[in-house]
Amino acid sequence: MLRSMNDLEDYAIRATDGTIGHVKDFYFDDQAWVIRYLVVDTGSWLSSRKVLISPIAIGHPDWTEKVLPVSITKEQVKNSPDIDTEKPVSRQHEIDYFGYYGYPFYWGGAGIWGGGIYPNMMMPDYAGFESKPLGEGPGTDEAYARADTAQHQHDDPHLRSCKEVMDYHIEATDGDIGHVQGMLVDEETWAIRYIIVNTSNWWLGHQVLIAPQWIQDVSWSDATVSVNLTRQAVKDAPPYDSAAQLDRDQEIGIHEHYGRIGYWTTETKHENTKPGR
């Protein structure tokens, strides 16, 4: 099911021994278009320190109570690496973060989360999962981890704040079509499936959905997203109703309108086992 990113703000993050805080923002990967971290305000118990929570740790959400349970403790969060969420998160920060929690790295695999599409399948205790290739002798695994860390410590992680891209202009091949109003996120993979576009500056009272795969370019300095679609194609597309749940038939209609292949077909090969949340 797809959830509006705006609706997920202020959800409570519940550790195994109590509430950590509330979601205030998200960091997404601007290449894979996947939510990599939730930015959580810890409130009074950690002097409103903001911490990052990976979807890898998130269990089955309580949508009614607006709670996201995580498989970590408050003490772990308290002692986690301090990251300034007001500045770009470097790959070295990510390596320190993943090392602290004992998570395998998400980058370098064939899927959006390592070798697959579900983040909690990367947990070290997930059935059938190996976090890294097994060595043939003592010390080999440790040597592999050190070499992998050294190789990736200067990588550009391409992380962006979801709040930052709100109101970015959307440009079609023949002119402006509106601005970013929100995003729809897959609740199981944490992939951003659609950008919600408000077209009110040229087509009053309408919202349409644009998939990240249709983006040609993003100019972060100009706050502009360019898509490989015409204004007429966007105007003729099925409208989006934010008050109704988007179903697969509607998604198929949108993709067929633009003559594009659905993400659900290209990801099937990575979906060997559905996570038991």
Image (cartoon, rainbow, N blue to C red):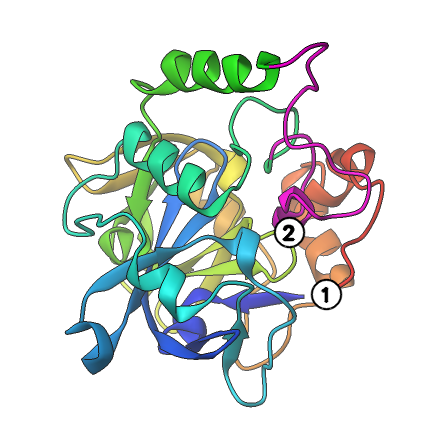
Position in image of residue 62 (x %, y %): 60, 81
Q: Is residue 198 visible?
A: no
Q: Nearer the viewer, residue 32 or 83?
A: 83
Left or right: where 186 falls relative to 34? right
Q: Assign a secondary structure to mark 2.
A: helix
**Quarter location, residue 231:** top left
Residue under label 1: 277
Residue under label 2: 120
- The kind of secondary structure the magenta stretch mainly shows is loop
Position in image of residue 127 (x %, y %): 80, 46
Highlighted magenta segment, given as a residue range: 114-138
Residue depicted at 44% across the width and 31% down the height? 31
Mark 1: amino acid: Arg
Looking at the picture, does residue 198 appear above or below residue 154? below
Looking at the picture, does residue 20 appear above or below residue 226? below
Give the mark count: 2
Magenta-colored stretch includes residue 127: yes
Left or right: where 134 falls relative to 34? right
Cα distance between the residues tagged 2 and 1? 9 Å
Magenta-colored stretch includes residue 16: no
Residue depicted at 61% across the width and 32% down the height? 114
Left or right: where 60 falls relative to 85? right
Q: Nearer the viewer, residue 44 or 199?
A: 44
Q: Assign a secondary structure to mark 1.
A: loop
